[in-house]
Image: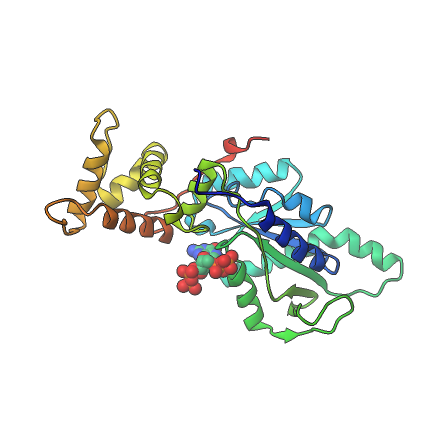
Amino acid sequence: MAQIQWYPGHMAKAKREISDKLKVIDIVIELVDARAPYSSKNPMLNDIIKQKPRLIVLTKKDMADADVTNQWINYYKEHHYFAMSVNLKNFKEYQKIIDQCQIILKDKKAKEQARGIKPRPIRAMVLGIPNVGKSTFINKLASRKATITGNKPGVTKSQQIIRVAKDFELFDTPGVLWPKFDDERIAKNIALIGSIKQDILPLDDLFIYALKYLSQHYPKLLEARYQLTIDFSDEDWLIHAFDHIAKLRKIKPIKGETDYDRVMQLFFSEINSGIIGPISWEDTTCVKD
Ligand code: G4P
């Protein structure tokens, strides 16, 4: 893993940028990918947002294993986090996120009102590592209700806030967090969900990891998509798997040899698109702390 590193400098920069915005917001909406909620979570987020109320939203629930997603939601609840899962391709689900933020902040708002503070819309900020759905979330909401409300106290010109629903405002740019990928398993998971480029890892290692994982957890999906059942006691299982997928998908050999790169490209693009079926790359047993 020598070529992959997690630079503290990246986090320091994100922390500075986010801390500035935090001063004027009521709640952080932290997006993680439901297929790998632990790996796609930035481990330093607590340190960045401190006591700010937070809603953890597991996106892409349509691409994840529903049982495992429920396990994660229960896990977060047990640990006193507010969490929910959504499919951001379905606009109807957006209101649920807004409603949940209102619920989380209800007591705070009531207290403010009791102290005579004039009610104002909730102001939220979306945070997450690349590819978890931040722009999808903001753009879909913004395109429906694009009332730009810059020039607010505490909000600089470069920070636009949009009213996206009655009593709900959002920063128009998300806080992008650097994924942590100095742990090999986490690096592989975030490559498989498309949050880092797959070719930053040795692709054959990633291919082996994915095949082993799918054989163990989702053998039926592997069988249905590739008619592939792997016998790991066969020392040539990997070559056989490559040859099998190449033949099935009619991938042309190069000088009589299976085109391994094309097999892997096809496999990873199908994994990324979710076409193989709902897959979760980790359940709550992966949590270390
Ligand atoms: P980011 O800003 O956090 O980097 O993520 P972004 O919104 O760009 O989303 C990354 C990809 O994930 C997009 O696909 C987006 O449509 C898809 N996506 C986001 N949320 C969900 C979800 O809940 N379910 C599913 N199935 N997909 C989701 P894309 O192929 O890059 O773009 P597009 O062609 O879909 O627009």
Residue beneath the point at 57% across and 48% down: 84
Residue 45 position, x and y percent, is: 63, 46
Quarter residue 188 falls in: top left
- Residue 162 picture location, percent across and down: 65, 70
Seen at 45% across and 36% down, the residue is 184
Q: Residue at x 21, y 26 (%)?
A: 234
Q: Is residue 261 visible?
A: yes
Q: Quadrant of the C terminus?
A: top right
Tally of numbered tags: 0
Image quadrant where one finds the N terminus: top left
Foreground residue among 212 and 100: 212
User: Is 112 situated left or right of 51 in this image?
Assistant: right
| Residue at 45% in and 45% down | 190
* Extreme-right residue of the structure: 115
Ligand 1's image quarter is bottom left
Q: Nearer the viewer, residue 185 or 94?
A: 185
On the rendered structure, is 275 left or right of 45? left
Is residue 8 left or right of 194 when viewed as pictured?
right
Residue 288 coordinates in the image, percent (x, y): 56, 30
| Residue projecting furthest to the top | 233
Q: Which scheme is used to colour this image of the protein? A: rainbow
- Give the residue at the far left of this rendering: 256
Relative to 53, is 186 on the left or the right? left
The relative height of residue 241 versus residue 85 in the rendered view (above or below) is above
Measuring from the top left, give residue 6's x and y in whole percent.
53, 44
* Any part of residue 88 in sight: no
Residue lying at the far front of the rendered structure: 2
Depicted 164 relative to depicted 126: above or below: below
